[in-house]
Amino acid sequence: MRSTAKAGPRGFGGPPGPPQKRVLGHTPSLRSSAKQRVREEVWAKLEEARAALFPGARGRIPNFKGAAAAADRLGETAEWRNARVIKCNPDAPQRPVRLRALREGKLVFSYMLGVPKFRQ
């Protein structure tokens, strides 16, 4: 069954948010294309360094060699120490972040894998 409710300002149910403001030189399509360029650059660097793990870097949040070390570096930041609640994706490279947060008694928000995303 497909939902007919319109998404709110952050993709959640409810009335749609206000129209996006146009900033000089920046439109939603330019932001998304810039974001895609950054993704492509990161994926290429991971592949070049042979740091991407199965199933590869492209088209996803890539699992990579050093994810646990990255979680350790995150744990050294003031932002991490001060946080009591975190939002974390269920992707494999963020597993060390989720585990660290739970070990430290932080509340972890995530979404479940296998749950279809709502479409507008």
Image (spheres, rainbow, N blue to C red):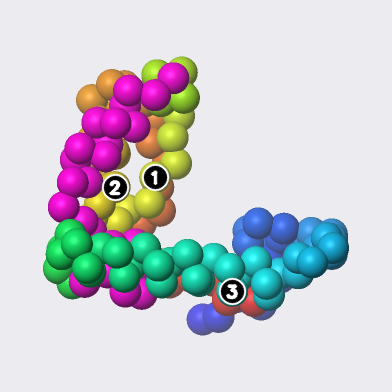
Give the mark nearer the N terminus: 3 vs 2: 3
Residue density around tag 2, few if under 14, some if 14–19, many if 20 or more, within 10 Å? some
Report whether 117 appears left or right of 52. right
**Residue shown at 76%/69% (left/top)?**
27
Verify CB contact (< 8 Å) between mark 1 and mark 2: yes
Task: Identify the residue at the far bottom of this view.
Answer: 1
Identify which amino acid the numbered label 3 is placed on.
Answer: Ser
Q: Quadrant of the C terminus?
A: bottom right
Query: Label 3, on which residue?
Result: 33
Residue 73 lies, in percent from the top left, at: 29, 31
Residue 31 lies, in percent from the top left, at: 65, 66
Q: CA distance from mark 1 to mark 2?
A: 7 Å
Circle nearer the viewer, 3 or 2:
3
Give the mark nearer the N terminus: 1 vs 2: 1
Verify CB contact (< 8 Å) between mark 1 and mark 3: no
Give the mark nearer the N terminus: 1 vs 3: 3
Q: Check the image and report above or below for 66 versus 78.
A: below
Residue 63 lies, in percent from the top left, at: 23, 59
Query: Label 1, on which residue?
Result: 88
Identify which amino acid the numbered label 1 is placed on.
Answer: Cys
**Residue shown at 41%/72% (left/top)?**
40
Element carrying mark 1: loop
* Residue 52 appears in the figure: no
Q: Nearer the viewer, residue 66 or 17?
A: 66
Magenta segment boundaries in residue numbering: 56-78
Residue 4 shown in magenta: no
